[in-house]
Amino acid sequence: MAIVKQSSDSILETIRMIDEECLDIRTVTMGISLLDCADADIDRSCEKVYAKITDKARNLVRTTQDISREYGIPIVNSRISVTPISLLVSVSGGDPVKYALTLDRAAKKVGVNFIGGFSALVQKGMTPGDEALIRAIPEALKKTELVCSSVNIGSTKAGINMDAVRLMGETVRKAAEETADNHCFGAAKLVVFCNAAEDNPFMAGAFHGISEPDCVINVGVSGPGVVREAVRKAGKNRTMDEIAEVIKKTAFKITRMGQLVGTAAAERLKVPFGIVDLSLAPTPAVGDSVARILEEIGLEQCGGPGTTACLAMLNDAVKKGGVMASSSVGGLSGAFIPVSEDAGMIEAAENGTLTIEKLEAMTAVCSVGLDMIIIPGDTTPETISAIIADEAAIGMINNKTTAVRVIPAIGMGPGDSLEFGGLLGYGPVMPVGKTSPKIMIERGGRIPSPIHSLKN
């Protein structure tokens, strides 16, 4: 009887997490290799890309819907990631936008929410195909609805490619300008990485790494509301290590749910199961906020003194709980801090408690980096490049993934706000320093890798 009661209690607890605490599977992402679609003729290559994606992913959405209905677990998104398209451009030549349009058409055909992989990996240098793809990003994101783009400009092993950093500052700015009549949405679908993960299921930075299998299922789980409620129930008298233990046990339960869904999806789609990415990815929904977890731990408001320490503990406890629950934890796994997608972050940014400088410090101890931050529309490309370089330096030195997804709000300044809707939410335009990094950015070249990268 005790075993039966324990089992029923666990079921009821999961139901409550789903119904009351915003627990969900944020994404089931199918990774698809397009290396066998390379062709010297770009039109033939595009035909192969479309055929492979629509074949491999034809049952993806239906399968996730079936699993969601059968298990009673919300699955918010079905997505696709593909091989970095710059690799195909290097073979075919031609206009990379053709590939973007093909990806968009294929994504719409199979019914997914987004497709990622209009990407390039240029941490140590750019091929002509890489540079052509990067220069095509603003037009590609303007002409497509579902395509997401990412560029990896640095790594601990290679250092930081400052020529690519300079180009990406211009690209982010132009992506916002090209979509100024659509809430500058192009920049919201573009991520600049250091130490990019090959198995990340989350957009906009997902791509299918070249060391991945031909096709794979990766799952992204989210549950900030669940963690916040667990901390609240623990009470105000627990020590910090006791709170870390509470978070770890909660992350264990969330990860088990992701493992269940990922395994079921992989079996039904007859492809390998890859990883569970246990990332506390917030939404604008009330209570579904990483900032609110930090405040429940004991901060008056996210962004104030103590924020970085609390976030470091949260991120570490989440990873420890996930690793205990599954041998397939991967991706980015930890806590995301996208400003426009987190109600608590938005509030802290609006009243000035949370600044870009504080966010940068926080990225040294959490997953990813400066994410969904809206900056003034007159921010120069050089300043955007410098923000990218600063964040890449944190990733390079700390041997972790960092990223920048900033949106220049064309025609807006501090005091204004930019609305995206849906999971992307809205956010205030955050002030950016006015001193110029122009000379530094124009130097180009490469920031060498740190001494601790020499491990062979």
Image (cartoon, rainbow, N blue to C red):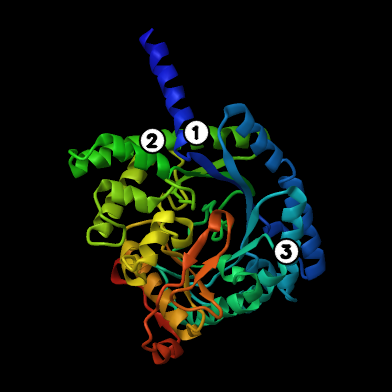
Q: Quadrant of residue 419?
A: bottom right
Give how far across and how far down residue 103 sits, in percent. Answer: 72, 60
Residue identified by numbered label 1: 19
- Dot 1 falls on a residue whose secondary structure is helix
Sequence-wise, the earlier of marks 3 and 2 is 3
Sequence-wise, the earlier of marks 1 and 2 is 1
Give how far across and how far down residue 325 sits, in percent. Answer: 40, 34
At a point 41% along the width and 76% down the height, the residue shown is 387
Whole-number angstrom distance, CA of label 3 to CA of label 2: 41 Å
- 435 and 391: which is toward the camera: 435
- Dot 3 falls on a residue whose secondary structure is loop
Residue identified by numbered label 2: 252
Up the image or down, 84 lies above or below 130; here it is above
Whole-number angstrom distance, CA of label 1 to CA of label 2: 19 Å
- Dot 2 falls on a residue whose secondary structure is helix
Please give the label number shown on residue 70.
none
Label 2 crowd bin: few (<14), some (14–19), many (20+), radius 10 Å: many
Up the image or down, 388 lies above or below 253; here it is below
Q: Is residue 433 visible?
A: yes
Cβ atoms at labels 3 and 2 below 8 Å apart: no
Residue identified by numbered label 3: 38
Q: Quadrant of residue 345?
A: bottom left
Looking at the image, the residue that sits furthest to the bottom is 439
